[in-house]
């Protein structure tokens, strides 16, 4: 499905439906690692979410977090679209080579 072409309200409905499906599945089979290994349920969402928001999305879905702030962050990220991933060169940052990765998430 092309989530980036939906309205915010439709996206929200699809997101809540996804959360309901995941919670239903996890209530029958609570092994989250097994679920993540065996499912492709997040693939379409991963395509439309920026890299920074994708982990927030997955955690919100797995934990059925429906707080307005979290949902709005996810929906806004989809509507505005993913940022192109362009890494600055050392010349652009002005940092020495070893410092060019400073501040990046340690698990990236």
Image (cartoon, rainbow, N blue to C red):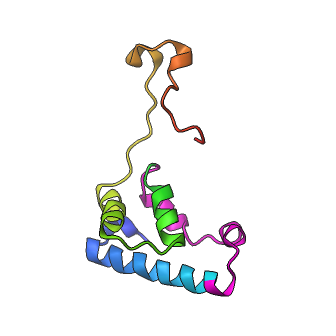
The structure residue drawn at horizontal position 46% and vertical position 30%, both measured from the top left corner, is 87
Q: Position of residue 32 (x, y in %)?
A: 66, 71
**Where's the N terminus, which quadrant?**
bottom left
Can you see residue 9? Answer: yes
Give the dominant element type of the magenta stretch: helix, strand or loop.
helix
**Where's the C terminus, which quadrant?**
top right
Decide whether residue 31 is among the magenta residues. Answer: yes
Magenta residues span 27-51
| Quarter of the view holding residue 5 | bottom left
Residue 91's place in the image compared with 103, above or below, is above
Can you see residue 7? Answer: no
The structure residue drawn at horizontal position 56% and vertical position 17%, both measured from the top left corner, is 98
The structure residue drawn at horizontal position 50% and vertical position 25%, both measured from the top left corner, is 102
**70 or 108: nearer the eye?**
70
Residue 43's place in the image compared with 10, above or below, is above
The structure residue drawn at horizontal position 67% and vertical position 87%, both measured from the top left corner, is 28
Q: Position of residue 27 (x, y in %)?
A: 62, 85
| Quarter of the view holding residue 62 | bottom right
């Amino acid at each position: 499905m092309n989530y980036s072409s939906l309205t915010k309200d439709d996206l929200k409905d699809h997101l809540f439906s996804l959360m309901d499906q995941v919670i239903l599945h996890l209530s029958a089979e609570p092994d989250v690692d097994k679920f993540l290994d065996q499912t492709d349920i997040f693939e379409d969402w991963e395509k439309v979410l920026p890299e920074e928001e994708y982990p927030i999305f997955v955690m919100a879905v797995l934990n059925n977090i429906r707080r307005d702030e979290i949902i709005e962050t996810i929906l806004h990220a989809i509507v505005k679209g993913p940022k192109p991933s362009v890494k600055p060169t050392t010349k652009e940052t002005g940092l020495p080579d070893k410092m060019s990765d400073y501040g990046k998430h340690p698990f990236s």
